[in-house]
Every structure is written in structure tokens, then in C-alpha cells.
Image (cartoon, grey):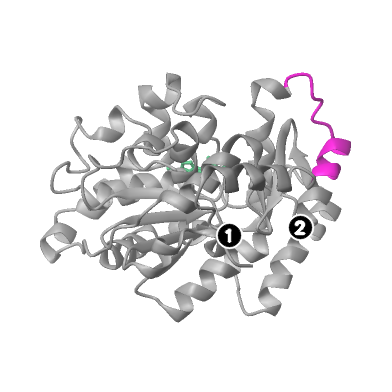
Amino acid sequence: MESLEPTNKKDQEQLVDEIKHTKDAWFNHPMHLYEGFWCGDTIFKGVIAFQSQFEAHDSDIILASMMKTGTTWVKSLIFTIVNRKKFPGNISEHPLHIKNPHELVPHLEVKFSNADQPDLSNVSSPRLFAVHMPYLSLPTSIKTSKCQIVYVCRNPLDTFVSLWHFFLQFEENKGIVPDMDLMEEYVSKYCNEIIPFGPLKDHLLGYWEESMKNPQKVLFLEYEGLKKEPKANLKRLAEFLGFPFSEEEEKGNVIDDVIELCSLKSLKEMEVNKSGKVYPWFENKALFRKGEVGDWTNHLTPTMAKRIDAMREKLTEVGFSFT
Ligand code: A3P
């Protein structure tokens, strides 16, 4: 589906009216089907403004992901890799100690939701941003400029469990009983591709196909791969971004310092992530849970797991296999 890219306020208002009838929700968070993806109510206007107003620079680096697939982690890695000359990973004054990764690498849909025209003029180059939107709906300038995209995906089973726990933490959801019946209901929604920014299949394949066509433009990472082989994947990431680790850096344990600084344990213990709040909807600590591969075995019944795993199988049928 082509991006509509409304150019003026009247077009934007018309779009808001048009999507109102296609409505669903994750817990108490309404979503609308817009250009074939499920877009949350709270950021919908931001999405439209972002599409029509954002001008990518050739040097921009954009992290793309579905929710709960390792976004926060990869934001911290990209920031640390790109800025490691200014802020070595082993210094106590590193910005990650005082700012959550979502502040250092902001989501553009949210930035454009908070301000009609956010001022990006003071952002130093390379500008680091993130998006949850599917590839097809990105502003044209992201596709046509030389800016780079890093995509991170995660096994659908752990992604579901992470999403489930994440949404249950919202204040507005208090009073909801998270029993097996409710989980069953959400497994059905998930399997029917009614998830924030989903369908998952379209989202993942959109970026994956682009990474196949244009590997200089899109780098594809997997949460599980990062967990299993962090060093090899960090080297890939740094090379792709044009900030490769030198031999000297490798010998000097610079890669290990980055891995350590950006680990779940390290980020979780930082005061800003214990008590801070970047987004109005939840506290920073909600972004850090277990970070384990295979946690789904502790939460899903075999039937639920089988249903979700069918999503993975469908992706395998079209040529995409998870690690
Ligand atoms: P779990 O809920 O399985 O623990 P996102 O950042 O896209 O919202 O993804 C959140 C998931 O990534 C959560 O998974 C969270 O615990 C995990 N996570 C957050 N920071 C991480 C890090 N530094 N290393 C590994 N996993 C991390």
C-alpha cells in the first residue's frame, strides 16, 4: 500500500476521520488500522505529521522495530557505538547513566506527536532516531536518502510474552485480571495480527526484503542473535554504521565495555531507569524485565505456543527463518 503522505492540516484531519471506523485495542489502548498497520490512538496524529514533515539526512541512522523486540537495547548499543570516541563505554559520566536510551535515540512518531513541528535543527550528526512504523509507511525521504536503517526482530513467542507483561503495567489497565482466559484472548488477537504496528509478518518482511535488496541501507539484527553472539553482532553493527572497531579497540576490550554498559543488568541498575520517566504512559523501569530467550515456556500453554509458533512457520514458508 502506498503511503498517503498528507501535505496539509485539512488532509490530516480528513485522515483522522477516515480511520476512526477501523478500531481495536490492546487492553485499554485503542488502535486504528492505517495504511494496513495498527496504529495507536495516542500517536496517530504524530504518525501523519512525521510522514508529511520529516526530511531525512543522508547521515541519519534510524532504528526500526516492532514493540518489545529489543528496541531499548539496540538504541543503547547504537548510541554507544557511534559516540564512543566522545564517551567511552567504561566511563561513569557516560550519557546512559543519566538518560534512558529512548531519550538519546528518540522515536520519531512520538516526537511528532508531542510537537506539531519538532525542532530537530540542533540534533548533532549523525542524528539517531527510531521508528516502529512499517517500511512501506515511512516518509519517502527515508527511503530515497542515503540514511541507514537498523532493524531488530525477535522470536514471536517471546515478543508476545513481553508485550503481554508490558501492557499489563499501564496504570489504566489496573483492575484487569490477567488470567489464562484473557491471555487466550490476546493470543488470538496476536495470531490474527491485531498488534501494535502489526501485522508482524508484513512488518518484518518489509524490512527484511529491503535488507536483501539493499544491504548497505538496511541491516537486519535478531534479538536472539545479539544474545548468543554479542561480539560478532556488535562488529557487524559498527561496520554497517561506518564506525568499525579498530584492531586496537578490539584488543583493548572496547567491544566488551560496550556490551557490558548496554547489558540489561547494567541499564536496569541505573537510577534514571529505576525512577525516571521518558514517556507519559509508563515509567522507564517498565522497559526492562527479564530479557531472556525462551521465557515464553514459563507463561504459555502448549496450545498457545503452537498457535503463535504458526506465525514463525508462515515466515519460514516465505524464506525468513529466525536464528
Ligand atoms: P522481556 O519482556 O522478555 O524481558 P523493547 O525495548 O523493544 O521494548 O523490548 C523490551 C524487551 O527487551 C524486554 O524483554 C526487556 O527486558 C528486554 N531488554 C531491555 N533492555 C535490554 C538489554 N539491555 N539487553 C537485553 N534485553 C533487554
Q: Which residue is mark 1?
A: 4
Per the rendering, the mark at residue 197 is none
Q: Residue at x 49, y 73 (%)?
A: 210
Q: Residue at x 37, y 24 (%)?
A: 272
Q: Residue furthest left?
A: 248
* Segment tinted magenta in the rendering: 174-186
Please state which amino acid type lies under the numbered disc 1.
Leu
Against 29, is 224 above or below? below
Against 133, is 175 above or below? above
Front label number (1 vs 2): 1
Q: How far from the left and from the top, in percent, is residue 262?
A: 35, 43
Q: Which residue is mark 2?
A: 308
Q: Is residue 130 left or right of residue 282?
A: left
Q: How far from the left and from the top, in percent, is residue 216?
A: 34, 74
Question: How many dots with numbers?
Answer: 2
Instruction: Please state, as top left, top right, bottom left or bottom right, where the C terminus lies in the image.
Output: bottom right
Q: Is residue 312 visible?
A: yes
Instruction: Find out whether the residues at labels 1 and 2 contact each other: C-beta distance under 8 Å.
Output: no
Q: How far from the left and from the top, in percent, is residue 269?
A: 39, 27
Against 30, is 255 above or below? below
Please state which amino acid type lies under the numbered disc 2.
Ile
Answer with mark 1 or mark 2, whichever residue precedes in sequence.
1
Q: Is residue 212 left or right of residue 120?
A: right
Of helix, strand and loop, which one carries label 2? helix
Q: Is residue 323 visible?
A: no
